[in-house]
Image: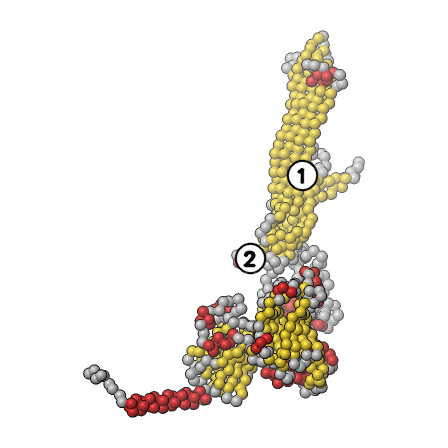
Amino acid sequence: MNPKQGDIVLTKSERSSCIGMFLFLFLLICESASATASDLSITGIDIATLTGGRLQIQMQMSGAAFAPKVFQTDNPARIALDFSGVKNALEKKMIPVNQGAASSIYVAEAADRIRVVVNLIESTPFETKVMGNKVLLTLNPANNSVPASFKHAPEAIQQSRIPVAANSLARSLIPEQTISGFDFTRGDKGEGRILVYLANPNTIVNSRQAGGKVVINLLNTRLPENLAKRLNVTEFATPIKFIDTTSSNQETTITVTTKDDLYDYSLFQSEGLLTIEFRALSNEEKDALERTRVKYTGDRLSLNFQEIDIRSVIAILAEFTGQNVVAGDDVTGTITLKLDDVPWDEALDFIMMTKGLEKFESGAVTLIAPLGKIKEYKEKQQETSTIIEQLDPLVTEYIKINYARAENFKNLLNGLDTGQLGTCGTKNVSGSGTQTGVQSGTPYGIQPMTQPVAQPGTQGGQNDKFKILSSRGSAVVDARTNTLIVRETTIRLEEAKKLIRKLDVPVRQVMIESRIVIASNTFAQELGVRFGVAGSKIDFTNPANTSTGTNNPINGTAIIDNALVDLASKGVNLIPPAALGMTLARGADYVLNLELTALQDQGKGEVVSNPRVMTTDRCIAKIMQGTQVPYQSGGTTGVAANTQFVDALLELDVLPQITPSGSISMNLNITKDEPVVVAPGQQPPITKRRVETTVQVMDGETVVLGGVFEGTLQNNKSSVPFLADLPGIGFLFKKTFSQNDKKELLIFITPKIIKDNAASN
């Protein structure tokens, strides 16, 4: 077949020449890239906080970056990034982070690669990304979903989600372990026992609870492929449902899924047999077991070593738990360990106790040394600090006090009680007579300071343990500007300023509003009668000239002189009754008169008192209004009577305290006294109403402290025997009285915390 016009036809030799040229160019590009990668170095590490609580670690390269090989471990929680052919150009190997889930970053260099290890507080989802000359490692909070970009990440990124053991130090100290068999049995009391047969007894076993499961790791242990499987043991009626056994990178992981959380498990080794036992618990047994495990909170592990070097054990624990541990040169010797299912912090305590060691923790570093060494170190450090303090120059600082008195802070710096720093001043008592005012005093149980303040160097009220100023330091007060002038070393001055910043804060205020309501409803009805005979010599034209008979004429007739029946109404509450008089018969100089008296009284009233007062938190406040009632006593002929005034006041006395939850606890004393209306010339009694209590109310809510209800119900009848029962005229010999009075007292309290903006206005 002939080629078409315009086509290019290559012979076999020409095609071979082109292929060779392409291969040469490809190898040249690879060598160039390799030479470039070999000169690549990491020049910086930056930390950035992103939205949603994410933390991004940015690793800067000297040239074009490439995707590293990423590994992750769960215990300890770490992320390791391996960069092949990259050098370390950083100034320091340890970089503290202490943000989000990351605690620190460690950079290690070995041969032709470097490893960047990110130490985590807990296992956290992450994603990696390459942008130009940067490698970005983003840590996502555990409660956030993994971004979609992570799900479709390259293979190198997806491998970072596989937990891989990074405890190379422990592997170098213990021989490689092999699992020769695996079995499960049920105990006599329903225990579930997992039996792991080991080739030799020296192994490290770590156990922890995660996600409702128990994860058991056997370090530097190989698992045969035929044993890597899931066992369904639900039918054995034990706390265990499934047992999953996996192996990766010289670490065997046994994941146990339980039926519920009411169980306890333990591990113990004996002659190459590791037994993991799960025992069912009741709710009470579970609570009691958790209370006994409060002291030690570390992950539980099992150790079985014969004559191992103590420094190696400490190194294994430090590497295994991710702790920063420093062991002194004098920490020497060997130890034999057989610990089963023990928290690592408890194991460390017993190891130190056995070898006569002690530890000192400072920040994120733990120092282990023989007994007494740390004490000597601290004593020498204290002596050095004392000498430095004696030689350190003094600095003068002018500190403005905003809310308290400068004199009070001067007392605090000298180790003295502040006196009135926590009180509210002295009471301002009003004079006698009718008064209305507000009083502010000291809190309940706290008396105002009357003794002079003890000066520095004296015993009264001083506590050297709380003294901030050194023997060289001094403090004076400028009362006009409320300024504290302190002359002290720089270190002591910072402590003094820290104390003042902590305590010189505004104290919140409270408005207490009360309502005292007295509601009354009275009703009285009285009906009476009186009739009798009036005497002679009655002047009907001018009844006032009548020589006998009463001077209360009705229609020109004297009403009654000598009463035959007197059942007249007497009135209620000094109110005279109404009367109707008439003459029944008249003969000679005498008349027979009849007087009917009746009263009906009905009244409704409501008395509302609304005292309110504002005061500072934990300071007592008092408001009162009323009169003073005079009482006379002891008056005789020629001797003046003694007059004494008694208060009849409406008073609100309160001590509020604002609790951290926002509620207000109040000690209340509410009094409402008032004199009773009596006839002129009589000494009035005083009606007293008082409530004294302690109550806690939320801000702005109203509480009813208490109420007193009084009710009076009377139905009285007075009559003349036999005559009162006569039909038709029996009412003339009767008197009836009915009374139905109701009175109620209610007290309402409403406290309100004054906000800062309202207080400033």
Residue at horizontal 74 percent and vertical 16 percent from the top: 723
- Pick out the residue farthest to the top: 588
Q: Position of residue 308 (x, y in %)?
A: 69, 84
Q: For residue 417, which numbered disc appears in the image? A: none
Mark positioned earlier in the residue sequence (1 or 2): 1
Residue at horizontal 49 percent and vertical 72 percent from the top: 49
Front residue (pair 659, 164): 164
Q: Position of residue 559 (x, y in %)?
A: 69, 16
Helix, strand or loop at label 2? It is loop
Q: For residue 709, which numbered disc appears in the image? A: 1
Q: Position of residue 133 (x, y in %)?
A: 43, 81
As drawn, 136 above or below 460: below
Count neighbours of disc 2 (C-alpha within 10 A) and say few if under 14, some if 14 to 19, many if 20 or more.
Answer: few
Helix, strand or loop at label 1? It is strand
As drawn, 716 above or below 151: above
Query: At label 1, which amino acid type do we have?
Result: Phe
Residue at horizontal 66 percent and vertical 31 percent from the top: 740
Query: At label 2, which amino acid type do we have?
Result: Lys
Q: Quadrant of residue 7?
A: bottom left
As drawn, 145 above or below 168: above
Front residue (pair 31, 63): 31
Q: For residue 755, which numbered disc appears in the image? A: 2
Q: Judge left or right: residue 651 versus residue 562.
A: left
Residue at horizontal 68 percent and vertical 39 percent from the top: 675
In this orientation, does residue 290 appear?
no
Q: CA distance from mark 1 to mark 2?
A: 38 Å
Q: Quadrant of residue 412?
A: bottom right
In this orientation, does residue 215 appear?
yes
